[in-house]
Image (tube, rainbow, N blue to C red):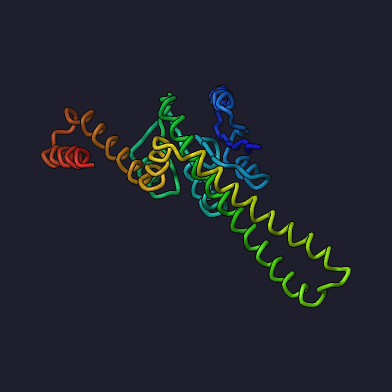
Amino acid sequence: MVEVSSILIADDEEIFRETTADLLRLRGYRCDCVGGARTALAALDDRSFDLLIADIHMPGSSGLQLAEEVGTSHAGLPVILMTGVPSLDSAIRSVRLPVAAYLTKPLDLESFYRQVNCCIAESTARRVLRDAQHAFAMGAEQLEMLGDEVSKEYRSPAADEIARTANSAIRVVLESLQSLESLWRRYASPEDAAAIRSLVVSRREAAFQEALEYAVLVLERTRNSFKSKDLGELRLRLSHLLTRQ
């Protein structure tokens, strides 16, 4: 049976978070919703999730503070940050945090779904590999113990119990291998593999590019208000840097 991936959405705008959750549920995800950073951390402590989607501007702790805490207390959990009020400061700060994507509202649904799929794939891979590693370790330990028991109990009534335990340990290892194979088959298509690789390898570079694009946009908007040769040169250099990405 395929395990349903779980997403936690933290946003103080009830209509937005519930609508977003409904859209993701239609795509087969399980979604829980909370209205702030503190309740998000409590939910993460209560059960495991594959992805956190959080608004940057919330009462109390911001989404940026939440992402920072999650990076420490729930390392490896992908985080997507959203904001209806983008700024150069928040974009740059997100680059320095374990953030998979910095998205602006209203959401571009195609881009949003793509980011969610990539984050879920990465999170699922981490979980399956972690579970498989644990199962291998447990199976190896059981088999090692059985080796000692066999030498002591060979041809005794305990031999049948030893055989049953050995079969159980081997079955755990085989199930772990099957989980790894299922994961590979699920994300083995060239399109999905490319998307996942793009997220894992260059998600920080993508966030950095968004910050650069926003910086250029701000300089363009203010070019008539602030007549400065230095600012003009900065805008040109940033634009040139973007064309080389």
The residue drawn where x is 23% and y is 35% is: 216
Specify the quadrant of the image occupied by residue 141: bottom right
Residue 66 in view: no
Residue farthest right in this picture: 157
Residue 172 drawn at (x, y percent): 68, 54
The residue drawn where x is 69% and y is 70% is: 144
150 to the left or right of 188: right
Residue 177 drawn at (x, y percent): 59, 51
Residue 148 in view: yes
In terms of depth relative to the viewer, which is nearer, 233 or 242?
242
Q: Quadrant of the C terminus?
A: top left
Residue 77 drawn at (x, y percent): 53, 47
> Does residue 16 lie above or below 198 as drawn?
above
Residue farthest left in this picture: 229
The residue drawn where x is 48% and y is 35% is: 117
73 to the left or right of 201: right
In terms of depth relative to the viewer, which is nearer, 43 or 228?
43
57 to the left or right of 224: right
> Does residue 178 lie above or below 155 as drawn?
above
In terms of depth relative to the viewer, which is nearer, 15 or 123?
123
Residue 103 drawn at (x, y percent): 41, 33
